Image (cartoon, coloured by chain):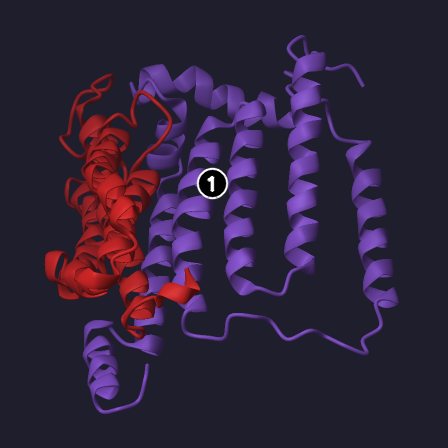
Amino acid sequence: MTGYEGANLAIALINVVLLGLLFVSAIAIARMRSLFAIVMLSGIYSLISATWFVALDAVDVAFTEAAVGAGISTALLLGAMLLTSRTAKPEKGKSTIIPLFVVIATGCMLVYATIDLPAFGDPDSPANTYVGTDYIERTPQEIGVPNIVTAVLASYRGFDTLGEVGVVFSAALAVILLLGFGERSLSATIGRKKGGRDG
Amino acid sequence: MSQKTDHHVILRVVAKPLIPIIALFAFYVQFHGDYSPGGGFQAGVILAVAVILYSLIFGITPAMRAVPPVFTRSLAAIGFLLYGGVGVWALLMGGNYLDYDALFNEPPGGHDGQHYGILLIELGVLLAVAGSMLSIFYAFAGRVTEIKDEDW
């Protein structure tokens, strides 16, 4: 594989370090039982992924990952964790051979698939040629917005973004339908606490 | 969290000046989205995080008093409607759904429709995401009263 000119040793080293950190935190999350530590570690995992996305020049994705993955999902998971117990039950008597085999087989297939992938940042790769160059060439005339990512998200792919907003909205709707609006259950919890039972 | 057991005084003092800065940064991300990374989604999440941080530190009840749940869920609906409404506006002007070029019936080469269309739908995304995230957070957090000190 022929890398592009920016793919020098320093960036490769940063990538290896970040991916190693991701690997370590993933293993730690899988082996831990304290839910509080798991929530915090998944926040750290998201933050490391965001850093890695910056190293890959995907700044918009990194920003979203830092805001959504490390920010709001950690807060929401903390809120969800408070509703349940603080530690996961240890699983005993389960065979680990079959899951290990599945993971190794999938990993081998993924590694095999990466052999056919174009090199990172390759200007002749399918992702960078057809529709990508089209957007880059047409955005200044058609949209007139300096940030091409915004032009693609909001204008060329406006329907997709509408669908995403719909997904977020219906997620909120589903949670409200399942758990209630919040203020009524809050007053109910306070009432129950005053009634003698500790919430 | 009465006065005599306030272990979190440093946390409160540090977080208090940060909250307005976080909210301000959300609006920067929103309105600078045409020029730099970011946009409605990120800005909405950051705005929601400002309120969530406030409620984590000062308790859920003051947060609900400052930003009522009824307000957040209306915000989510208004944002989604605003996004869809821009599409209907384009339809009424004779274009396709969400075709911003049709918004003002400009001659070809004009970018006003694209600029205002993107501005409006990004605003819709901001309101919908911030409102939805806060509604979800309130739904979860409304079911517990306080985080006990030994759980920190």
Q: Please name the residue that numbered disc 1 is placed on.
A: A65
Residue sitting nearer the eye, A122 or B25: B25
Q: Answer with the quarter of the image where residue B120 lies.
A: top left
Residue sitting nearer the eye, A126 or A10: A10
Residue positioned 21% across, 51% down in the render? B79
Location of the N terminus of chain A by quadrant is: top right
Task: From the top left corner, tell me how far across and down residue B151 is, in percent.
Answer: 42, 65
Above or below — where is B42 with respect to B151?
above
Above or below — where is B23 with respect to B145?
above
Q: Residue furthest front?
A: B4
Which color was chain B given? red
Circle 1 sits in a helix, a strand or a loop, which is it?
A: helix
Residue positioned 22% across, 29% down in the render? B31
Query: Crowdedness of circle 1 by 10 Å Cα count: few (<14), some, many (20+)?
Result: many
Q: Answer with the quarter of the image where residue A176 lies.
A: bottom left
The chain displayed purple equals A
Q: Chain of mark 1?
A: A
Residue sitting nearer the eye, B7 or A151: B7
How many circles with numbers are drawn on the protein?
Answer: 1
